[in-house]
């Protein structure tokens, strides 16, 4: 009895087996994040649907047709760039496993995602956000510590949520961060952030601690480690309290921190280390932000602008 085209592929390879094996490759060999693995597997299933499960027919023409269909469907450039990268990774893996005679992904051009300039706070706005009066309740103490640390260090929201109490080195004023690819880095922070974290740890965190709290630095109201959604709500709520400040999430504070570092004279390599970027090209977008600020100031102030 024959199986459906979408289940059985060339050489007796089962579609579900291919997708599962590729997922294990992404998790264990490539060490990609769960979010990226889910996105790649969604893309692979879309590609296999495009060829009715016939892995053996995939060539560069098929890949281009699949991506063209995605473009016509109105997919964003960032999505197309990710799907191009996924296709190249997938076909290379299938070729190594012997499921494809050749690797058509080698002939596929790279799609580049648009890189719009990030929205950032100016320094006065950042100061106003951080100086909103707060009470001494645990939630207010926690939220203030979160905001101070996000702006002081420019860490990603996932990195902030993963912090443990022992990751804060109070003597050296640095935090130990486990970033993308499980790469560890140390990020400095200033006195305002240290004071806010200390107030939370002394007067707030002990009141919320439970058995499940473990070593987590930031806790939710039920005592578990805080999650990214809660941190985003904290940031949005605080920014909404300051008139004239644009709405943005934790990543906006990361962009702001990087921009203000460069405006203050930090070199690009140092900012790269602080942010945990693998490539300097990623960090260079912040020079564009600073240049735009410089041009705006010049146009406003110079008599011959």
Image: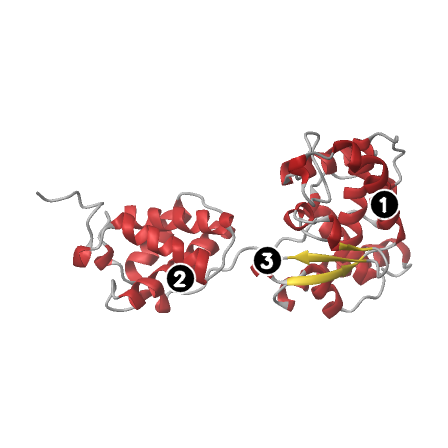
Q: Quadrant of the N terminus?
A: top left
Mark 1: few, some, or many residues within 10 Å (few <14, many ≥20)? some
Observer-nearest of 25 and 120? 25
The residue indicated by pointer 3 is 180
Circles 2 and 3: CB atoms closer than 8 Å:
no
Observer able to see residue 180 = yes
Q: Quadrant of residue 110?
A: bottom left
Q: Is residue 77 left or right of residue 250?
A: left
Secondary structure of the residue carrying numbered label 3: helix
The residue indicated by pointer 2 is 89
Mark 2: few, some, or many residues within 10 Å (few <14, many ≥20)? some
Identity of the residue drawn at 35% across and 68% down: 107
Which numbered disc, 1 or 3, marks the residue closer to the eye?
A: 1
Q: Is residue 174 left or right of residue 227?
A: right
Which numbered disc, 2 or 1, marks the residue closer to the eye?
A: 1
Observer-nearest of 218 and 63? 218
Observer able to see residue 244 = no
Task: State the mark number for residue 198.
Answer: 1
Query: Quick one: label 2 or label 1, which is nearer the N terminus?
Result: 2
Q: Position of residue 191 (x, y in %)?
A: 89, 52
Query: Quick one: label 2 or label 3, which is nearer the N terminus?
Result: 2
Q: Is residue 285 left or right of residue 68?
A: right
Q: Position of residue 181 (x, y in %)?
A: 56, 60
- Label 2 to label 1, Cα distance in Å? 45 Å
């Amino acid at each position: 009895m024959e199986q459906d085209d979408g289940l059985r592929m060339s050489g007796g390879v089962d579609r579900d087996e291919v997708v599962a094996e590729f997922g294990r490759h992404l998790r264990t060999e490539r060490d990609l994040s769960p979010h990226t693995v889910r996105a790649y597997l969604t893309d692979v299933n879309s590609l296999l649907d495009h060829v009715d499960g016939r892995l053996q027919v995939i060539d560069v023409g098929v890949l281009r047709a699949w991506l063209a269909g995605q473009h016509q469907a109105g997919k964003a450039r960032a999505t197309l760039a990710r799907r191009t990268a996924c296709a190249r990774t997938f076909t290379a893996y299938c070729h190594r496993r012997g499921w494809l005679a050749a690797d058509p992904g080698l002939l596929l051009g790279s799609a580049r995602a648009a890189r719009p300039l990030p929205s950032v706070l100016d320094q006065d706005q950042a100061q106003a956000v951080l100086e909103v009066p707060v009470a001494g309740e645990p939630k207010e103490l926690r939220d203030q510590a979160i905001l101070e640390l996000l702006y002081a260090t420019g860490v990603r929201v996932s990195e902030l949520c993963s912090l443990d109490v022992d990751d804060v080195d109070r003597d050296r004023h640095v935090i130990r961060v486990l970033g993308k690819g499980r790469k560890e880095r140390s990020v400095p922070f200033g006195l305002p952030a240290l004071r806010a974290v200390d107030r939370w740890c002394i007067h707030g965190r002990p009141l919320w601690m439970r058995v499940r709290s473990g070593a987590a630095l930031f806790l939710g109201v039920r005592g578990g480690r805080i999650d990214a959604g809660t941190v985003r709500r904290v940031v949005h709520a605080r920014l909404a309290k300051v008139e004239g400040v644009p709405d943005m999430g934790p990543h906006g504070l990361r962009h702001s921190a990087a921009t203000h570092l460069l405006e203050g004279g930090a070199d690009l390599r140092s900012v790269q280390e602080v942010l945990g970027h693998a490539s300097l090209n990623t960090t260079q977008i912040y020079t564009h932000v600073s240049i735009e600020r410089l041009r705006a100031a010049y146009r406003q102030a110079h008599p011959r602008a």
